[in-house]
Image (tube, grey):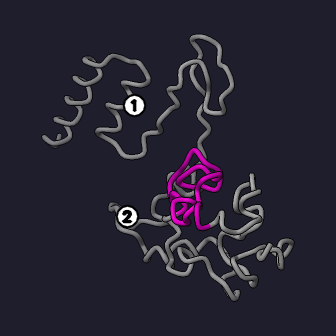
Amino acid sequence: MNRGLILIIELVTISALLYGCSSDKSQKVLSFFFDGVPQGDTTEGKDASGARREAGKPFKVERYEHGPFAAKQCESCHVRGSNNLRLPVDQLCFTCHTLDIKKKHIHGPVAAGGCTICHDPHGSGKRYLLVSDPKDFCLYCHDKNDLEKIEVHRQANEQCTVCHDAHSSDNDFLLKDAWKGRSSQ
């Protein structure tokens, strides 16, 4: 057997013996050795949604996985036996996903082929494989103070995608058709 593989097995075994089997400690140990280990919510007494949990019961962590990743079809995106992608990301996602980008306005990350700026290609705890919480997601790139200069944004309590299309639109500001003409309010 390969000496490197034996060393890894020994390190994992020793770490497990030292840190025990608590899920929090196990997650830390496994994350050190492997990518993609899901992280549970450690908020005591409440689950990820804020609901109380029964004592001694684990937190329910909802996880969404990309179809090929969940089916262990790595070669759908990666070259066999490597972490290299079959195509550049700006082309790869469109081999399976259809997205109408022949519109007047294209969201910057979409135009640049940067799907992974917003979406995790393997899995996420957020719907649509988003890399962050949808409520505040757009504020990573768009300044909240600038947005609040627009009246309708000061009153908004919804996710941005209620009014705006995250990918493309024929309307200014990527507004959905239902909201067309309301941007100046």
Q: CA distance from mark 1 to mark 2?
A: 28 Å
Across the whole image, how many numbered discs are drawn on residues?
2
At 66% from the left and 67% from the top, the residue drawn is 149
Residue 119 on the magenta segment:
yes
At 23% from the left and 32% from the top, the residue drawn is 9
**In front of the other: 116 or 16:** 116
- Dot 2 lies on which element? loop
Sequence-wise, which precedes: disc 1 or disc 2?
1
Residue with the most extreme right position: 178
Amino acid marked by disc 2: Arg
**In front of the other: 153 or 166:** 153
Residue 113 horizontal/vertical position (percent): 51, 77
At 55% from the left and 49% from the top, the residue drawn is 70
Which residue carries the number 2 mark? 80
Residue with the most extreme top position: 55
Q: Residue 57 appears in which quarter of the rendering?
A: top right
The quadrant the N terminus occupies is: top left
Q: Which mark is residue 184?
A: none
The quadrant the C terminus occupies is: bottom right
Q: Residue 164 appears in which quarter of the rendering?
A: bottom right
**In front of the other: 132 or 76:** 132
Residue 171 horizontal/vertical position (percent): 76, 82
- Dot 1 lies on which element? helix
Which residue carries the number 1 mark? 27
Residue 137 on the magenta segment:
yes
Residue 156 horizontal/vertical position (percent): 75, 57
Left of 170 or right of it: where is 101? left
- Residue stretch in magenta: 118-146
